[in-house]
Image (tube, rainbow, N blue to C red):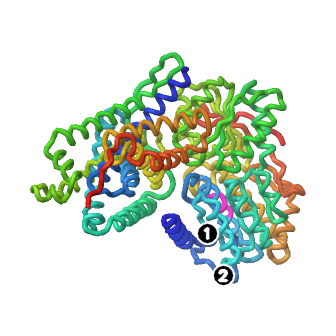
Amino acid sequence: MVELIQHVINGLSLGSIYALIALGYTMVFGILKLINFAHGDVYMLGAFIGLYCARIFGFAEHPSLGALAVTISAAMVGCAAVGFLIERLAYRPLRRAPRINLLITAVGVSLFLEFAGQLKFGSSPQFFPELYKPAGSWNFGEIRINPLQVTAFGIAIVLMGALQFVIFRTRLGRAMRAVSFNRDHASLMGIPTDRVISATFMMGSALAGAAGVLVGLIYPKIDPLMGVMPGLKCFVAAVLGGIGNVVGAVVGALALGMAEEFLVGYWAPTYRDALAFAILILVLLFKPTGLFGTRSTEKV
Amino acid sequence: MLLAATTLALGATACTKRAVPTAVAPSGTGQPIAAAAETIKIGEVGSMTGEDATFGESSHQGVELAVKEINAAGGLKGKQVELILMDDQGKPEEAATSVTKLITQNKVSAILGEVASGRSLAMAPIAQAYKVPMITPSSVDSRITEQGDQIFRVCFNTPFHAGGLMRFATEHLKAKKAAILRDVKNDYSVSMSDTFAAGFKKAGGEIVIDQVYSAGDVDFKSQLTAIRAKKPDVIFLPGYYTAVGLIARQAKELGIEVPLIGGDGWDSPKLLEIGGPALNGSYFTTHFSAEDQAPLVQAFISKYKAAYNRAPDAIAALGYDAMQVLAEAIRKSATGASGEIRDQLAKTQDFAGVTGKITIDQNRNPVKSAVVLKIEDGKIKYQRTIAP
């Protein structure tokens, strides 16, 4: 029983980080019908921006909650800028091009970021400094909860709440939903679609940046290819939840984190990475719309 | 498919560009190296970048230090030694490409490398096929020297290494129940685990759980949660330092207090940086201790510190020894041709190396002792020596 609860806690902690990345996928897909393969690499950049920020300000020597907040903010702003640039330079010129061109461009952007990252940061793993050192750990008998996990989980929940607020309670959010519903109609209604799309990319990228720092905090090893696998897995999480659906992405990511944890703990650790793809195949075969997705009929 | 092809193509170009010949000029003269025909070319393959980059770096620094000394003393057979280094990025397939290039294009007389067993295993059959002698400074997997009569090593091999750890666990730590957490993608880790498990059971102990991970993983909590439930006396971690550091941290977070033990894969200056205080109370065996007071060892340490501004680890010491053993064989050979070097290497007897006396046996393995080191208060301390 203790083991089971511990696995649930570990799974939730992993899943909440997947959720932050999956949200970016689902938002961009919702609005552009584009699978932004570069998203996992934006998450990697977030971790490195956090690393450099921590080095410049010397946070490793003075860990505190404030240091963590500053680092996360820096990574979010930096990644938002990267997201803006990617959209502006790579995707916007292809707005009227067939969707397959966009998809190939996304793969290109992803490879560019990965190899430019290796050139700039070096391909050896680097060690993320401890930005925040909560004292001790919370013990309930044998069950151990690392306060860092709780902090990361809390930050993830706050950011997801903020996103939900923006999408459903603000003018920008309403515009985003309108563009996602029908871009041409939204444009006819006077919505500046290009600006809304930029904003969507920036928000999604900022969440990925935050995820990068949180991962660095819990698993302090970062390298320029760290975004490849989580990127693919979080795409699966978004598909599982119903791609384009914000709540679905969160639920899908938590489910994936939990499923991985149980698979590794009780059965076959080497199949950890295969699990996500097995889920992808099953979802596409039996429920292509995902858990929360709605079927949309294409009208001619 | 497209993705894979592009990555491969990029990898290939990157590899050729990274072949940096690091020719070492005799100290003092400042002259560039002599024309190619007048040098003895030695190829080195190492992981200068990638997941275990400190292995490649340490090993290369050891080799480089030896080459500098040899050249300063007039070289070998009247020729300067030219060291050609290839970076394999920590990938077995790159290691294989590198060794082929060194032999066919650079025409080297002998090969030094690799540190990791998996990559040495990828290189050995190629060196054997071209009949170019190869010395692995620090790969312990027994199968490497079994690839053929051209392949040598200057470190002890797995049966001794894992056997020593097993005896240390049962006799010194009085462990009855052991857990294993092995890296399934790593030949070294797998053969160490198998040897350890077999020996531990024979000594009357019990392997309560044998968990696996894959190189590159960062989350080990689920494996550790399963291990914790079995209440082992000791956890055997035969991985490389990056994973070991992360595992130690996560083990502490889960409240696991039993000692962690491992092999020379832990031996890196990065280990303590990653693992931090979570590693206190852990033990590992390796080839050499900087606390050894023998004059030869202390001289090596001070020369190494002067050159690289840090204390050498065992991997660096083995790199140095590998190059010195090779130089000795070249000196004894008639012309310095590959075949003669091989014959002289096989005859190496009582060579006084930094990591101990090296005598190559008929299976091209040296007979050597190991040291057990303990991590205490964030420092690595000498514990005891295990005789061969």
B28 within the magenta span = no
Q: Amino acid at mark 2?
A: Ala
Relative to A271, B155 lies left or right: right
Relative to B1, B59 lies left or right: right
Query: Residue at label 2?
Result: B36
Task: Sort mark 1 into few (<14), some (14-19) or many (20+) by Cα contacts within 10 Å.
Answer: few
- State whether residue B273 is above or below residue B206: below
Taken as a whole, is the magenta stretch helix, strand or loop?
helix
The residue located at (61%, 44%) in the rendering is A270
B63 within the magenta span = yes
Rounded to the nearest whole Å, what is the CA distance between mark 2 and mark 1? 19 Å
- First in sequence: mark 2 or mark 1? 1
Looking at the rendered structure, which numbered label has been put on residue B277? none
- State whether residue A180 is above or below residue B336: above
Residue B253, how many percent across, how many down? 51, 29
The quarter of the picture where the N terminus of chain A appears is top right
The answer as to whether the residues below labels 2 and 1 share one chain is yes
- Observer-nearest residue: B361 or B82? B361
On the question of residue A58 being in view, the answer is no
Residue B268, how many percent across, how many down? 60, 46
Q: On what subunit does the disc labeled 2 rest?
A: B
Region in magenta: B60-66
The residue located at (58%, 33%) in the rendering is A265
